[in-house]
């Protein structure tokens, strides 16, 4: 289990992460969803030890990071938001370098590299320089690299940002197949659909604090499963209803253009924070 206890990060006067408490179960696919500047990257960077925390604790399988940094670090694989692969090296060399860094034997490195290149469908391009890869291929290679040392927990910071719609969907398939490997995944995203498609539970984060935490379905049920959008006098107003019948009855009495649609996580976020996620 990955446990965040009162996790806090301050940059001078700015509190980027404000007393975050969170338990992520083994094998869970957990999404931190929030707008730009909400504190998602800072949280992931603290767990991956790239950014020192100001206070609080990070505990993995009952082991505190403060007490045993190396033991905890080896359990984590990190896919950062921005490409930090070696562009002048091949995919194979990038993975080999990571395996050496983690003291993996030559035989084990070879076995893992072959398996992960196959898993990410990069085998045919393994001897190409990474600088020649597309954005989607680079992202897949970063996932393969993070999995090289067989971590228990995978941290993915905005795994599909900058990818086109088709590459994003392929990445979702790859991420879904991680679930069957029994990995625990913490993913940050500001794409609503991504959280809905992939995550068992979602934490909505704003201003460095959790504002809501539940399964995507339960969060949506909290606002009402059906939304009525009414565009009138130059503005769109939304109302939410538990049943389609209630939504239809309400819509029938409205003027202007009316649209009835299923509610989504963005509605939840808007209702709770008065702010759009994709801002
Ligand atoms: N190194 C830093 N120095 C000072 N302030 C920082 C630093 N890194 C982040 N911040 C601030 O901390 C807050 C949280 O930033 P963070 O990058 O964690 O947000 P985010 O939710 O990941 O946003 P995004 O989706 O844009 O990546 C922001 O106000 C940001 O400006």
Image: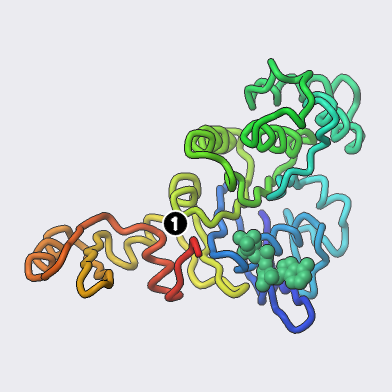
Which element type, helix, strand or loop, lies under badge 1? loop
Residue 270, image x, y percentages? 41, 70
Q: Indicate the quadrant where residue 8 lies.
A: bottom right
At x 42%, y 75%, the residue is: 274
At x 85%, y 31%, the residue is: 88
Residue 94, image x, y percentages? 82, 31
Q: How many marks overall?
A: 1
Q: Indicate the quadrant where residue 251 lies.
A: bottom left
Residue furthest to the front in view is 234
- Is label 1's Cβ within 8 Å of ligand 1? no
At x 37%, y 55%, the residue is: 217
Please say whether residue 40 is visible from this viewpoint. Answer: no
Q: Nearer the viewer, residue 149 or 167?
A: 167
Residue 246, image x, y percentages? 13, 65
Q: Is residue 117 above or below residue 30?
A: above
Q: Quadrant of ligand 1?
A: bottom right
Residue 41, image x, y percentages? 68, 60
Q: Is residue 152 left or right of residue 274?
A: right
Q: Which residue is mark 1?
A: 215
Please say whether residue 246 is visible from this viewpoint. Answer: yes
Q: Is residue 91 left or right of residue 143?
A: right
Q: Indicate the quadrant where residue 174 lies.
A: top right
At x 24%, y 60%, the residue is: 226
Q: On the rendered image, what quadrant is the N terminus found in? A: bottom right
Residue furthest to the top in view is 124
Neighbour tally class for label 1: few under 14, some 14-19, many 20 plus, Cα within 10 Å: some
Q: Is residue 23 left or right of residue 108?
A: left
Image color mode = rainbow
Q: Nearer the viewer, residue 147 or 160?
A: 160
């Amino acid at each position: 289990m990955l446990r965040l206890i009162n996790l806090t990060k301050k940059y001078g006067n700015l509190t980027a992460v404000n007393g975050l408490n969170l338990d992520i179960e083994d094998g869970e696919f957990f999404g931190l969803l929030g707008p730009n500047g909400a504190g998602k990257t800072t949280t992931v960077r603290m767990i991956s030890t790239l950014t020192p925390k100001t206070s609080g604790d990070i505990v993995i399988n009952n082991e505190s990071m403060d007490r045993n940094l190396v033991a905890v670090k080896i359990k984590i694989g990190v896919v950062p938001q921005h490409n930090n692969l070696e562009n002048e090296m091949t995919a194979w060399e990038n993975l080999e370098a990571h395996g050496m860094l983690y003291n993996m034997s030559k035989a084990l490195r070879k076995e893992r590299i072959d398996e992960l290149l196959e898993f990410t469908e990069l085998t045919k391009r393994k001897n190409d320089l990474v600088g020649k890869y597309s954005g989607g291929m680079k992202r897949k290679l970063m996932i393969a690299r993070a999995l090289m040392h067989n971590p228990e927990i995978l941290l993915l910071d905005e795994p599909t940002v900058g990818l086109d719609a088709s590459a994003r969907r392929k990445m979702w398939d790859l991420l879904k197949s991680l679930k069957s490997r029994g990995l625990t995944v913490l993913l940050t995203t500001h794409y609503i659909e991504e959280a809905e498609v992939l995550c068992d539970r979602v934490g909505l984060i704003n201003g460095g604090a959790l504002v809501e935490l539940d399964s995507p379905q339960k969060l949506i049920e909290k606002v009402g499963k059906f939304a009525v959008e009414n565009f009138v006098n130059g503005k769109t107003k939304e109302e939410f209803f538990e049943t389609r019948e209630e939504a239809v009855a309400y819509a029938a009495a409205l003027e202007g253009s009316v649209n009835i649609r299923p509610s989504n996580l963005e509605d939840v976020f808007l209702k709770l924070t008065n702010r759009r996620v994709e801002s």
